[in-house]
Amino acid sequence: MSLKPVILDVHDLPELWFRALWELWNQHSGDSREYMVQHGSFSGSHKRKEFDYFLAHVRHPGKRPLVPIVPEGSNISPPTNMEAIVAYFADYIMGTEVAENETYTYGSRINESLDKVIEMLKKTPDTNQAIIEIGKPEDILISDPPCLRLIDCRIKEGKLHFIIYFRSWDLWAGLPQNLGGFQLLKEYMADDIGVEDGEMIVSSKGLHVYDYVWGQVEEMIKFKK
């Protein structure tokens, strides 16, 4: 079998971040690939280390802190912080403004269907149609298409759950920033719908780490041994 999926079951978002890094560097190093990007971000200038396919079940994504904790005394730069995640949620997930140099933002795509999805889940919680789609067919024509493709919503046992898919996903900095923001979105939606906050299932066929942070990944793993 040439494709080797990696599946994790974790407690919270900080554990997801570290476990994914550990798996990519250690347990499943043979199940990943290292290559020079030919088309896309940093094409021809940086290598990626990448899973063939990655899926994780996060049982308590709302547990604080939402952000990774780096060891004291290390030279590791934290990939994000709570202030940055709150700003990301407000400006880039809930905000709809698209700057002149931008083709889209996640918020401009999310808000096309957000209110409709919330109303659908209020009226008919047992549905498979409550999906926030970010990707569009015409995205294949733009130079920087969205990495995030969909946020699928499920209400089960009185809780709102997210199933999220990324076509390509930066593990070091993108994953903690993205999922921290989407957790705030899930909490916002759950409060509006009148249900409890639930779990996340996240997946990607392109979860990767760029070579310019490989040294920090190795130091992070060394501190955690």
Image (cartoon, rainbow, N blue to C red):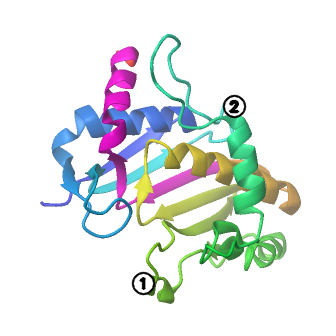
Which disc is residue 64 wearing? Answer: 2
Screen quadrant of the N terminus: bottom left
Residue 43 at x, y percent in the picture: 30, 63
Front in this rendered view, residue 61 or 140: 140
* Badge 2 density bin: few <14, some 14–19, many ≥20, Cα 10 Å: few
Front in this rendered view, residue 174 or 23: 174
Residue 103 sits in quarter: bottom right
Residue 201 at x, y percent in the picture: 52, 54
Q: Which residue is mark 1?
A: 140
| Residue pictured at 36% horizontal, 31% vertical | 217
Q: Which residues are magenta?
A: 199-223
Disc 1 to disc 2: CB gap under 8 Å: no
Answer with left or right where residue 219 lies relative to residue 189: left
Residue 63 at x, y percent in the picture: 67, 34
Which disc is residue 10 wearing? Answer: none
- Indicate yes or no whether the magenta region holds residue 211: yes
Front in this rendered view, residue 153 or 183: 183
Answer with left or right where residue 170 lies relative to residue 38: right
| Residue pictured at 78% horizontal, 49% vertical | 196
Answer with left or right where residue 194 lies relative to residue 127: right
Amino acid on which the number 2 mark rests in the picture: Arg
- Indicate yes or no whether the magenta region holds residue 155: no
